[in-house]
Image (cartoon, rainbow, N blue to C red):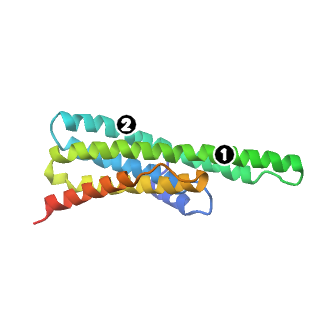
């Protein structure tokens, strides 16, 4: 995935294959949110901005790594579902492989949710000290982060059941967008 152009990624996302899918999109959304925060921080001054640049750059890489990990995890799920099931032993082996693959497929979205929490923390710290000429990019980051978390939640729920409560995270992202809109209002 790292070598794909945006068009290649979107073409593969649109294809009739299980991966990349929503989880890869979530990781990419988190990476985009991190990149936007890093950009705003680079246009801003002070110690907080410097810390945000460092942390956001690391989280951008984390998001991309998790997008790739999610794609790999769902390839494993697809492979498990294709295993033969004609004998009792094959059915048992297939069931075990599916169960194991689905358990592994939950890890990337849970990690995206954790990264999204860190990114919202950074956005909240950056907003008061940010360069007001690029403040709308904090709202763009918040919306990307919110999308990453919401997508990840449903991906966890389909494979494992109820996910960790992220309603507070979604509200915090919305609050950031609202705060930016207040700042730019005439």
Give the Cα separation between the discs numbered 2 and 1: 28 Å
Q: Residue furthest toward the bottom?
A: 186
Query: Is 59 placed left or right of 71 in the picture?
Result: left
Res. 3 visible in picture: no
Circle 2 crowding by C-alpha within 10 Å: few under 14, some 14–19, many from 20: some
Task: Find residue 66 and report its horizontal and vertical position in percent.
Answer: 49, 43
Residue drawn where x is 23% and y is 42% of the image: 125
Task: Find residue 13 and report its horizontal and vertical position in percent.
Answer: 53, 59
Q: Viewer-proximal residue, 158 or 30? A: 158
Residue drawn where x is 78% and y is 51% of the image: 83
Q: Which residue is mark 2?
A: 58
Tell which tag, 2 or 1, sits nearer the viewer.
Answer: 1
The first of marks 2 and 1 along the sequence is 2
Q: State whether residue 87 is above or below residue 47.
A: below
Query: Is 105 placed left or right of 50 in the picture?
Result: right
Residue 101 got which mark?
1
């Amino acid at each position: 995935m790292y070598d794909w152009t945006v068009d290649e990624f979107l073409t593969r996302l649109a294809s009739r294959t299980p991966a990349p899918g929503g989880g890869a999109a979530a990781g990419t959304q988190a990476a985009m949110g991190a990149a936007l925060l890093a950009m705003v921080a680079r246009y801003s001054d002070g110690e907080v901005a410097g810390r945000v640049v460092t942390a956001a750059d690391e989280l951008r890489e984390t998001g991309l790594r998790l997008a790739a990990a999610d794609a790999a995890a769902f390839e494993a799920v697809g492979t498990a579902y294709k295993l033969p099931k004609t004998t009792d032993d094959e059915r048992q082996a297939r069931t075990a492989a599916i169960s194991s693959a689905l358990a592994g497929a939950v890890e990337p979205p849970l990690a995206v949710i954790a990264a999204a929490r860190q990114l919202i923390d950074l956005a909240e710290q950056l907003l008061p000290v940010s360069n007001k000429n690029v403040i709308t990019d904090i709202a763009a980051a918040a919306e990307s982060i919110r999308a990453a978390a919401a997508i990840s939640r449903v991906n966890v729920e389909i494979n494992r059941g109820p996910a960790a409560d992220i309603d507070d995270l979604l509200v915090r992202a919305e609050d950031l967008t609202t705060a930016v809109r207040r700042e730019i209002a005439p």
